[in-house]
Image (cartoon, rainbow, N blue to C red):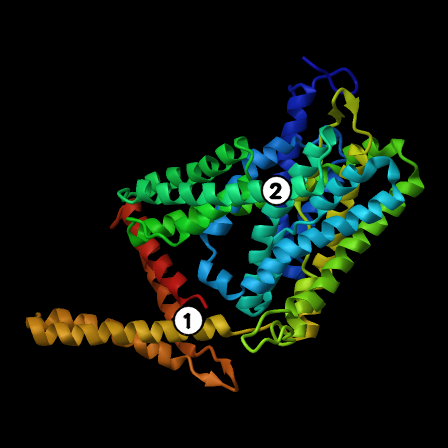
Amino acid sequence: MASGPHGTPILGFDSVTASYLGAGLVIAISVVASRTLARRSGIPYPVFLVVAGAGAGFLPHVGGTALDPRIVFFGFLPPLVYHAGLVTSPRELRAHAWPIGLGALGLVLATTFAVAGVSWAVAPGIGWVGAFILGSVVAPTDPVAATSVFGRLGVPPHVTTILEGESLVNDGVALALFSIGVAAVASPTSVGRGFLDFLRVAGGGTAFGLVVGWLAAHVRRPMGDAASQVVVSLLVPFVAYLPANALGFSGVLATLATGLVLGQRPSALEPSGRIRLAEFWQVLVFLLESVLFVLVGLQLRHLLGAVGQYPVQEVVALTTLAVVVVVGVRLIWWLAIPTVRWHPEGRLLDTGAVPRSERIALGWSGLRGAISLAAALSVPSVVSRHRFEGRDLIVFVTFCVIIATLVGQGISLPALLRWLGLCGSEVQQRQRVVAERRCAEAALTLLDEMIADEALDGALTESLRERYERRLERARLIAEDDGAVRRVPLRDLEQRLLDTQRDTLRTLHRSGEISYSVMRTVRRELDLEQARLAP
């Protein structure tokens, strides 16, 4: 058995096992603490995760081991991309197709070539291909930190849709460019051939994903139990990602397309089953994202050792310029380019396409994440039996870009949103009030028709009518007050009633009048009722 620094086993484990256990403990503590700190400070929780990981990487038996990019690409990425597509509306994507498409394609290309040009000028030793690879890995954005701030501060929903849509697609575009760059390390290619390869990788991945989504929709249709749906939902992203990747297509775009297709197809699940499935994915995605951010931070110790062979001046200059270019190009792009769109009258410019305040917010929301680091780590260190000299420098600069954008922009983003006046949007609350009122009115109308046509039992119909009239009255009581949705005492009253029922339920269980299983069943119904009351 391997020994510790003084020749003794580490808590009975060898050093490798102790390293994994230490990293796992750091991840668990960081995940729990980050949520608490984020709620109290208003700072995005991924910031705390990365900082905690970076600090813990210097503890004995925790850091110092490089993250295998295959773990990210084949373990984390498929379910994360699939879920993002699953909860995204194609209709909303189409409604904002211009800014999303321009950002996901044009901005990625602009960032890639801008960073590549600067890198080649500052560090010519990595070569043009290495500079292109660096540009492609820092081009895609990570939506988690920015959208968590958007949702908490009430940023208008369409702004969040644009950011999420851009982040969904630009991962696939950037990784397609990255694969072309890596291939060019071993076999130089022309611009025309590279463009054709890009079309093949991106288009083939999208088409493959659409087919997988259509097939999966038919496979899951007869499944009426939540457990089977959970198993299928876990398999589908890997069925889309792995074969597409093996065929040389974009696995990210394939998985995204599959999620978009299945998100719009109805399933055979009962309402309770849909709730269980949604809750499962909510917890899974949170855990995967949190673990990824901690793993990013844990790489700092290893990367500092790997980059020591390069001149300090070159490393500092390249890192600083890469951060400035990544942030600057995005700001310039969002301030200028998304205002361009075609009009039937023939005018090309429309400065009102996206309001200036929203463009500033989107421009400052380009936080980078684990996808960039995983791509950089997957750059081969040996090509055609020769060492690829620029690999360690590419990985280190990528890590610094992630930290600079995630921590610097992530911390300042809430203050910027408040200064721009984008906080406190109540569009979704208004829409919810309208939806609740219209649904209750439709149910009452149908009930009246059924009573007239079928002579239903009076006691039954009276009970149903009271239920839907209460829902209609609740929606009407949420009135307009100076242009804002006003919370009324009705919800506070209902909350007190639910609390009283829970106290009664616990009393019945303690006295032995009901079993634990019965208490859990009724408590779940009360929880669902309370979830419906949430704003």
Q: Quadrant of residue 530?
A: bottom left
Q: Where is residue 280 in the image (x, y as percent from the top left)?
A: 43, 46
Say left or right for 211 vs 190.
left
In front: 498, or 279? 279
Q: Is mark 2 on a helix, strand or loop?
A: helix
Amino acid carrying label 1: it is Arg
Q: How crowded is mark 2: few (under 14 residues within 10 Å), some or many (20 or more)?
A: few
Residue 417 visible in the shown view: yes
In front: 220, or 132? 132
- Residue located at (39% from left, 47% from top): 277
Q: Position of residue 4 (x, y in %)?
A: 74, 20
For label 2, the residue is 196
Q: Is mark 1 on a helix, strand or loop?
A: helix
- Residue located at (38% from left, 37% from top): 231
- Residue located at (51% from left, 51% from top): 84
Q: Does label 1 or label 2 sit earlier along the sequence?
A: 2
For label 1, the residue is 432
Q: How far apart are marks 1 and 2 (CA)?
A: 46 Å
In front: 524, or 83? 83
- The residue furthest bottom is 482
- The residue furthest left is 455
Q: Position of residue 211 (x, y in %)?
A: 41, 42
